Each structure stands twice: as structure tokens, then as C-alpha cells.
Image: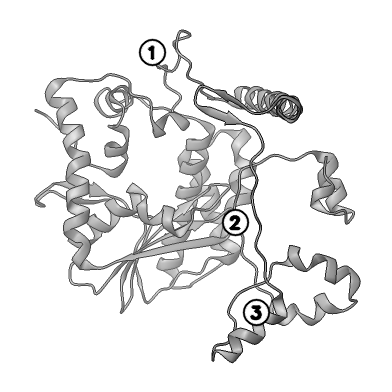
Amino acid sequence: MNLPVMTRSGLEAARCGLRYKTLYVDGLDDPSDYSLRGTAIHLCRRKYVERLAAAQIPQDAEEARLAFIEGVRDAKTPPQLIPEVRDVFERHVEHFELNLEAFIATERRRVNATAALPHQFEPDLEYAWPDALEIQDIKTYYVAMTEAQARTAFQTRFYMWAAMQAWPNFPAYRFTYDFIRLNKFVSVQFSPDEFDMLDREVRAWDAVRQARHAEQRWDAEPGEVCTFCHLHCPVRDDPRRAYLRVTNEQEARGNAGQIIVLEKELKMRKQIERAWCAAHGGLTVDGEHFGFKVSTTRTYAGQAVVDTVRQLGEEPSFRVSASALKPMFKRLRGLEQDLEPVLETKETAKFTHWSEKGALRAIEGAAPDDEE
């Protein structure tokens, strides 16, 4: 059985036999604006880091300019993608500084043919710190992962497994995602003691790949890879099946239009059902109950809580949301400014959509809940 060398992307593709065979057995590509953009930005960044390392400088605008030109040239980036690649790359290099003391390499393909499970991997950036071996990986996503998502991502776990073999004896191993479009970093750390756990996971993934080769089983299996796969699929493209797939911007716009229509219809249907249940009582449909459910809200007077907790020997540690204080901000001039020193902000990304009219209202100072 002639197996290609094991890689992280190959293991992920092997979850679908059709995609794996197309890419890793037949040697065909699955190009898209998404992948071409990522390839170009990665190559520009690699060229930039190589130039900085050669010149022994942490940051330089001229080296960034030359790296961009070389990267776009070598990636053969389509003209329509060059402006976006330039914008994202320039935003990234404004904040990026290469740590010359910790730097090991950038995008160096490392093949471990003598490992118990032979494999190869190609980290975007490798740093050797006194406390940890760190791998950094750049992403051009429009939303950042949470720390929990970063820890469970297969890329994280595969690279940490590979790093522990490539650079043994570090006290810890750290994987950092650099979301360069957002200038956000998410890091997770693993100890050498976790190698056996990671090894079992990688072997389980590879067992799927090996079974496909042994059994010549190349059937299409819908899953996570469908979100960015553009290959013709006998399962997803079968009109007799209820699968939905978006493979280009036109389809994405059509899907968004359907969401708007369906959300408006759902809102109207809920109003109708609410009125029916108010007049006629609740309904049970296919095990789901529709009707009015009483809920009880329990609150305590804020001052009493603070005083009581302090009497018991502790300092209150709870937070009060800005939305809860909004009426007091309106009533008590200067309160919001007085509380500014103790304000904490936390950003979360939630997929949603909003109207242009609502966005204009927000700019003009209208409350978000005024949006129609």
C-alpha cells in the first residue's frame, strides 16, 4: 500500500473519501478565492520574515514592500485578489515584529521519516523561548477562535504532537493563532505529559486514512470540510437530498436572501401561534409544546448584597453590566465617566445580520434595541 506521507491537511481531508482521493491520490487542486488569498498572504509573510532574519532587523517597511511584491508574484495571485492581499498584509506588518533571539524558522517543511508514525508539517513561524517551544500560525479569518476552540482544533493538536517530536525536552509547547485581519492572538499550551493523549488522537485519525487506502473506499461523506469544499459532490449536489451548499458569492447572497425571508416568516408565524394559544390554549406537535410558560426572576437589592458580603468578610467580586446601568447613566450625569477606571470590556463574535438603517441609527447615537 503506497501511502502519501501523513500531513495535518491530509488527515482532515480523509474524513471525506472523495475529497481525499481527489487531492492526495489523484493530485488535483480545489482552488477558490479563499485558498488563493491565504496562499498569497502566507507567501508574502514568509518572504518578509526571511528578509528580516537575513537583515537581522525586527521590522522594516521597505522589506515588507519587497516581500509583498515577491509573494504575489510567486503565488501567481489573480489580479482581483491583489488589493485585498495588500490590505491584509499591510495591516499585519504594521504590528508584526520578529523576535530575532527566539526565531527558529518560517514555513520550513519538516519531515520526520524515522518517527513511529512518519509525518511532515510546516509551521508558519517557530520560536524557541526559555519556557516553551512556540508555533505561530496566521489566519485570515473574519472572526477569531476562542481559547477553547483553539485547544480542541485538530491543527493545534497535530502540530503540538509533531513539535514534541521535532523539539524534545522543552518544558512546554505553545500554539498561537495570529488572526492577522483582526490583530488578535489566541494561544494554548500543552505539557510533554500530554503527548500520549495527542498520539492516540493522531493515530485514530490516521487509521481512517489508512483504511481508505487499504479498502479503496473513496465515498463522499458530508462533514466539516463541506464548508470550504468546491468539488463536484454526488451527495451534496444530489437534488434528491436536502443538503445545502454555498460554493461562491452568488450562492452566498442567495442563501442570505432566503434567511431574511425565512426569519420574517418565522416571526410572523410565532405571532400567529402566540395569539392562537392565548385564546385556545397550548398545543403539542410532534413532541414539541407550544404555549405560555411562567418563569420567575429573582433579584436582590444591590446595596444590601454589597453590605452583607462585606459583613461576612469578603469583598464583592461580581460585575454589573453596562446595559443594567444604562438608566442610571441617563439619570445621573457623570456616572459613566466616574466608572470609567473600573470598566472592563470583553469582545465576542456572534454571527448575525443587521440592516443598513439600523447601522446608521447606531452611528447617530440610537440605542441598538431601537433597530427594527
314 or 99: nearer the viewer: 314
Spatial separation of the CA atoms under disc 3 and disc 1 = 62 Å
Name the kind of residue labelled 2 in the image. Thr
Write down the residue under mark 2.
Answer: 348
- Mark pair 3, 2: CA separation: 29 Å
The residue sitting at the top extreme is 240
Q: Residue tagged by mark 3?
A: 305
- Which mark's residue is nearer the viewer, 2 or 1? 2
| Left or right of residue 116, residue 231 in this image | right
Q: Measured from the top left, where is residue 240 in percent x and y? A: 45, 8
Pick whichever, 29 or 273, lies toward us. 273
Q: Secondary structure beneath disc 3?
A: helix
Q: Which residue bears the numbered disc 1?
A: 234
Q: Pointer 3: residues within 10 angstroms few (<14), some, or many (20+)?
A: few
Q: In this view, does 269 lie to the left or right of 17?
A: right
Mark 2 and mark 1: Cα distance apart in space: 37 Å
Picture residue at 65% right of the left edge, 54% below the top: 296
Q: Can residue 78 be seen in this view?
A: yes
The answer to whether 226 is drawn above or below residue 77 in the figure is above
Q: Earlier in the sequence, mark 3 or mark 1?
A: 1
Above or below, 340 relative to 262? below
Amino acid type at mark 1 = Pro
Residue 16, quarter of the rendered image: top left
Dot 2 falls on a residue whose secondary structure is: loop
- In the shown orientation, is residue 325 left or right of residue 69? right
Return the disc, 2 or 1, that comes first in the chain's sequence. Answer: 1
